[in-house]
Amino acid sequence: MATTRFFLSLLLLLLAVTSQMGSALSEKSSQINSNSVLVALLDSHYTELAELVEKALLLQTLEDAVNKHNITIFAPKNDALERHLDPEFKRFLLEPRNLRSLQTLILHHIVPKRIGLEEWPNSTTESTHHNTLSTDPLRLSSFDSQLKLAGTAKVVHLNAVVRPDGVIHGIGRLLVPKSVQQDFNNRRSLRAISAIKPEGAPEVDPRTNRLKKPAPPVPVGSAPVLPVYAAMAPGPSLAPAPAPGPGGPHHHFDGESQVKDFIQTLLHYGGYNEMADILVNLTNLATEMGKLVSEGYVLTVLAPNDEAMAKLTTDQLSEPGAPEQIMYYHIVPEYQTEESMYNAVRRFGKIRYDTLHLPHKVVAQEADGSVKFGDGDGAAYLFDPDIYTDGRISVQGIDGVLFPAEEKPSEVKPVSHVKVVAKPRRGMSICFIFFFLLVNYFVGIDAGIDCYNRKIKCFHWPLENAGDGFDTWWGYWCVIVLSAQ
């Protein structure tokens, strides 16, 4: 019995020692040697590839690969990445939302085995395929006895770096796998989110009781006929109207996925966590924006960074509907990029963009080589351009929170009443005088007075013994009275 207990104790002791030795060996193996091919890559003159490896967050993946087996790295020279690479394709790779495509591209240049000169076929008609750390294999071939090919790239420096756990071969151009090229083509042509507008129900003309002629077909991917405000329900929400749209049963626009994509991009980009939190948790704008994009509408989001959002007070966010109204003022129902907005303000000066916060508009103008939104102390500058652009949603980072300008009441000027005094008609009096003189000369004073007594009142004094001269002066007196009236 004692012997059995002794052997059991000894067995447990051996198991404990073995497990400790295994863990120690595993810890030792997980550490990268300074003579590793991975360290040599980071310190080599292939600086562009090393920078892409760091941006793709692949250091831990490559460390695990080096610990398991030797690797072969086909490293493009710096000129191939700096000058000979399509700028649009490079911009596509460096966007945070395309991180997976960048990782696939880099892993396509790494083979999990050591490949030397003997691995290339000697005949120009033969080729060999080797699995890479990505899903696409790499084809090795020979153009002649001196020129070796890796995929479509020439091997310009064979065995550029040789280490115990791997080797680096220099190549003349970047290797682009088919999956990455397909992702780039879909993003560039918007083929993945193209829309086909559904046909509406037939309408009957009430005058003729016949079917109306169908409307002309709408081009594929065109904007909706109705403005974005027609798809918004009244109130603080952005719920689209129940009318059918491109986001119907066919799902030509996947607005929900696009909104999730751009929010995930904000989180990976860094510095916009508060904006993402408001869209997802504090409000339901993320869901409602997805519905709008599914209906075929385009949006541009002016996203304040975390420093700007931290300046908001509790009073500004505590009122009912305040967060929604703040976000509405930062959403423009147009698709604008940094280039399009800057060109517009450079050409036209001040530009007023409509927002979802009706009827307020956000003012943009050029300032210090950038785009400035708003005026005065509440202005904000375009800080991080084109954080996310996919043809339907554009996100532009700004360094301030925008608020609508307060409307100033228009001053009403008092209207002064001017008294208009009618001027006497001198012309008519002169005509009366001339006519009276003619009558007095040809007909006589009595006929002239009788003629004018019908028109104008005049005083008549009975003068019985007056002579002809007095009658003449009496006629003149009547003329004076008539001219005064």
Image (spheres, rainbow, N blue to C red):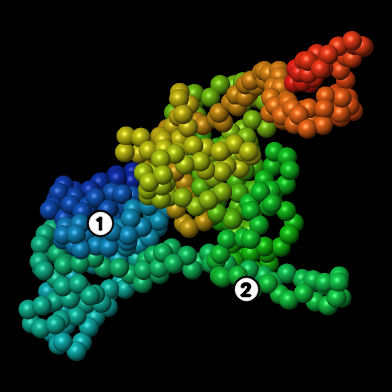
**Quadrant containing the C terminus in the rendered view:** top right
Element at label 1: helix
In the displayed structure, does residue 171 sit left or right of residue 419?
A: left
In the displayed structure, does residue 461 sit left or right of residue 397?
A: right
In the displayed structure, does residue 95 sit left or right of residue 50?
A: right
Label 2 or label 1, whichever comes before in sequence order:
1
Disc marking residue 66: 1
Residue 73 position in % (x across, y down): 21, 63
Residue drawn at x 46%, y 29% is 375
Residue drawn at x 82%, y 72% is 205
Where 18 falls versus 221 (above or below)? above
Where 34 falls versus 253 (above or below)? above
Disc marking residue 217: 2
In the displayed structure, does residue 460 sit left or right of residue 186?
A: right
Element at label 2: loop
Residue 285 position in % (x across, y down): 62, 43
3D distance between C-alphas at marks 2 and 1 = 58 Å
> Mark 2 and 1 residues: CB-CB less than 8 Å, in contact?
no
Toward which corner of the image does residue 61 lie, by quadrant? bottom left
Q: Residues within 10 Å of mark 1 (few under 14, many from 20)?
A: many
Residue 387 position in % (x across, y down): 42, 46
- Amino acid type of the residue tagged 2 in the rendering: Pro
Count of picture labels = 2
Res. 428 in view: no
